[in-house]
Amino acid sequence: LYLPGLVDKLEAVDPEPIQDFRSHLEAFRPRIVLNMLSDPKDSDRVTRLRRSCREYLGVDLEHLGVIYRDGLQDAALSARLPIVRYKPASILAQAVERIGDKIIELSADEPDAWLSPDASFETAASEAETDFEAKSDSVSELLSSGTLSQGDLLETVKSQQIEINKLRKENDLLKAKILQANDAGFTFR
């Protein structure tokens, strides 16, 4: 049974609801992430899945990325931390970051993904400054008490550099959205 063939037959009987269904189907854009793969050959599954979705359902499935199985997943889970916080420089964390970047880019392409009117760069800058001060105070306290080693501090600095790069990307995205909104005639207070 092919959904596109069934839809064509139903359209011959009752075209009005089928036109509505087709418009909803065009807006439906599912995305997939293959998780916990142990072999790169397993990523071929997404090709077969995408082809099946297109042929049997008439739906294009977008592939966002692959996350391979890694022992760090269990360690991060035991520590009750997301992998991007537990080991931000790991391959696993980088894969998650890349997928997150793709999702952010996709949301920028969607016409109804506008910023809320009260979002502002001043608020974001103020929150980032407050977070930075809190983290600096915490690190200073840990260093002076001997709880934090020099290696731990280096890992923290690397983590902060990754977070800064992420914030820069988000900032660029927000700037692009504001420019799009401005070009579309929206006014900002």
Image: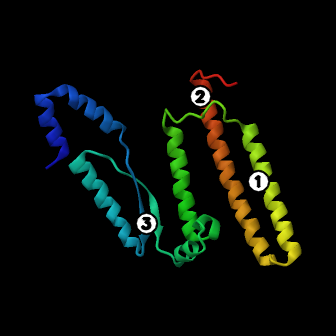
Q: CA distance from mark 3 to mark 1?
A: 32 Å
Q: Secondary structure at mark 2?
A: helix
Q: CA distance from mark 3 to mark 2?
A: 35 Å
- Residue at image x 22%, y 50%? 55
Determine whether 73 is above or below 184 in the image: below
- The outermost residue toward the right is 144
User: Answer yes or no: do the residues labelled 3 and 2 have beta carbons within 8 Å?
Assistant: no
Q: Amino acid at mark 1?
A: Asp
Q: Amino acid at mark 2?
A: Ala
Image coordinates for residue 36, horizontal then vertical, percent: 43, 70
Q: Secondary structure at mark 3?
A: strand
Q: Which residue is labeled 1 in the image?
A: 131
User: Answer yes or no: do the residues labelled 2 and 1 have beta carbons within 8 Å?
Assistant: no
Looking at the picture, tell me which residue is in the foreground, 88 or 79.
Answer: 79
Q: Quadrant of residue 20?
A: top left
Q: CA distance from mark 2 to mark 1?
A: 29 Å
**In front: label 2 or label 1:** 1
Q: Which residue is labeled 3 in the image?
A: 35
Question: Can residue 48 be spotted in the picture?
Answer: yes
Image coordinates for residue 163, horizontal then vertical, percent: 69, 57
Quick one: label 3 or label 2, which is nearer the N terminus? 3
